[in-house]
Image (cartoon, helix red, strand yellow):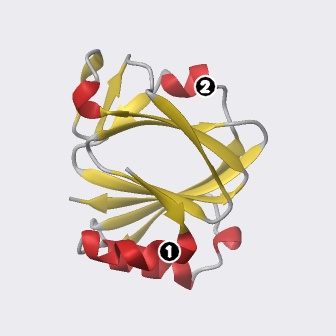
Amino acid sequence: MILDSLTNSDRYAGLNPLFAKAFAYIHSVDLASLEVGKFDIDGENLRGIVSDKNGVPAEESTAKFECHNAHIDIQVCIRGNETIGWKPRNTCVSPRGEYNAEKDVLFYNDAPDMFFGMTDNQFCIFYPEDVHAPMIGEGMIKKLVIKVKI
């Protein structure tokens, strides 16, 4: 997992061939004006999802404690105060169901090891080994998630 400010995003462009394109997109648009919905940035390689909704209690988010096999998430907090739960996948012991390849998601019953906060113009990168519970908070949270194909 990586947590940083968008002002430092260039430092991460070399970590994955698609990160440079993802961050170029992020810096090329007015994030505040993005409309809620799903869209392609670079075909199947980069897809965007914008949400703008009320944060949820920790219990609700951790009930969907998730990770992905086929994508890396770049999650950008556009507006609000978001808390995210996190735990390394290799220490999770209680999967909930089977991996859903169509939705690229596996849920766990485990509890996060830690919680961290994000606010305006901060981002985190979740690799397949990062189990996460996003959107914890009070009030409206607008965010962009870019799904980076592995």
Against 98, residue 119 (above or below) is: below
Q: Position of residue 31 (x, y in %)?
A: 64, 71
The answer to which of marks 2 and 1 sits earlier in the sequence is 1
Question: Based on the displayed image, in which of its 4 quarters is residue 53 positioned?
Answer: top right
Against 40, residue 10 (above or below) is: below
Disc 2 is placed on an element classified as: helix
The residue positioned 22% from the left and 50% from the top of the image is 70
Residue type for callout 1: Asn
Q: Nearer the viewer, residue 38 or 117?
A: 117
| Left or right of residue 87, residue 80 in this image | right
Q: Position of residue 40 (x, y in %)?
A: 40, 68
Question: Based on the displayed image, in which of its 4 quarters is residue 20 positioned?
Answer: bottom left
Q: Tag on residue 58?
A: 2
Q: Position of residue 108 (x, y in %)?
A: 34, 22
The residue positioned 30% from the left and 50% from the top of the image is 127
Q: Nearer the viewer, residue 77 or 38?
A: 77
Q: Residues within 10 Å of mark 1 (few under 14, many from 20)?
A: few
Q: Tag on residue 8?
A: 1
- Mark yes or no: residue 75 visible: no
Mark 2 or mark 1, whichever is nearer to me: 1
Q: How many marks?
A: 2
The residue positioned 34% from the left and 76% from the top of the image is 13
Against 21, residue 79 (above or below) is: above
